[in-house]
Amino acid sequence: METKKTNRLERLKKDPSYFITEVIGDQLWQKQKEIAQSVADNERTVVKACHGPGKTWISGRIVLWFLNTFPDSIVVTTAPTFSQVKDLLWKEIKHAHNQSQIELLGKVSDTRISIDAGWYAVGRSTNEPTRFQGFHAEHIMVVVDEAAGVDKEIFAAIDGILSAGKMRRLLLIGNPTDPSSYFAERFKKPGWNKITISALD
């Protein structure tokens, strides 16, 4: 019985789509599965997408996958404004957490899930780089929603968060509205797994 539980946990860690369907009880379309698996397999994932393909929806569920399958993990989420953090990304996180068919760990509030002192997810606005200091964990992930609107100084602070840890993950996702943004430039850089969702998809 113990072996079965261990094998299931290992699958949940390696297969976020399995976590989302079997634990939360949601269904994904192919591009959402691709994004989730990219985060599992790659340290850095960047996704450019049109409006309306469910990119914030999948980002919220990836947050819950990471937090619930990696003990003592920290997830930091952000977006260009605090209202986007609270009313878009964290709305999805709270809904999925509360509606999960299997009870998830932690107590959820407007922009935080607390499991233990060093095991939590939090939402931060991007007006001050200092808001991204002091996060240290063996397993750490940063999710940036609407990433085209986030300043380069914030990404420098995020790099600091990801400079340590056994498992590090960074997901940038958004609409590439500004070709000169840090977000858009990542599509020309090595070391990133790049995903595009077009209106045709």
Image (cartoon, grey):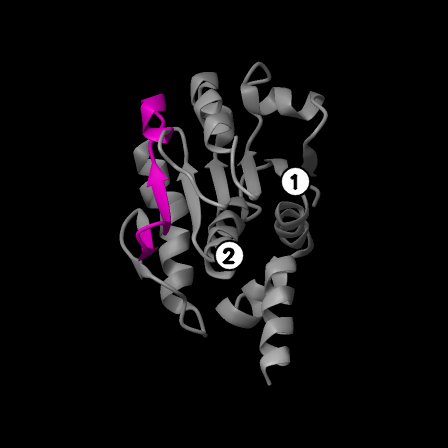
Q: Position of residue 114 (x, y in %)?
A: 31, 55
Residue furthest bottom in the image: 1
Q: Is residue 128 magenta?
A: yes
Q: Is 6 rendered above or below residue 131?
A: below
Q: Position of residue 53 (x, y in %)?
A: 58, 46
Question: Split into 4 quadrants, where in the image is the N terminus?
Answer: bottom right
The answer to which of 58 and 175 lies nearer the viewer is 58
Q: Which mark is residue 199?
A: 1
The amino acid at mark 2 is Phe
Q: Which of marks 1 and 2 is in front?
A: 2
Q: Residue 53 carries which label?
A: none
Q: Which residue is painted at 67% across and 46% down in the image?
A: 38
Q: Is 67 rendered above or below residue 56?
A: below
Residue furthest left in the image: 109
Q: Where is residue 146 in the image (x, y as percent from the top left)?
A: 48, 33
The reply to whether callout 1 and callout 2 are in contact (CB within 8 Å) is no
Q: What is the distance, in whole Å, between disc 1 and disc 2 at their CAs?
A: 34 Å
Judged from the image, the secondary structure of the residue bearing numbered disc 1 is loop
Q: Give the mark, 1 or 2, whose residue is nearer the N terminus.
A: 2
Question: Split into 4 quadrants, where in the image is the C terminus?
Answer: top right
Q: What stretch is highlighted in magenta?
A: 113-132
Q: Which residue is painted at 35% across and 49% down in the image?
A: 118
Residue named by callout 2: 70
Judged from the image, the secondary structure of the residue bearing numbered disc 2 is loop
Q: Classify 10 Å Cα crowding around label 2: few (below 14), some (14-19), many (20 and above).
A: some
The answer to which of 106 and 200 lies nearer the viewer is 106
The amino acid at mark 1 is Ala
Q: Position of residue 123 (x, y in %)?
A: 35, 41
Q: Is 101 rendered above or below residue 26?
A: below
Q: Is residue 83 magenta?
A: no
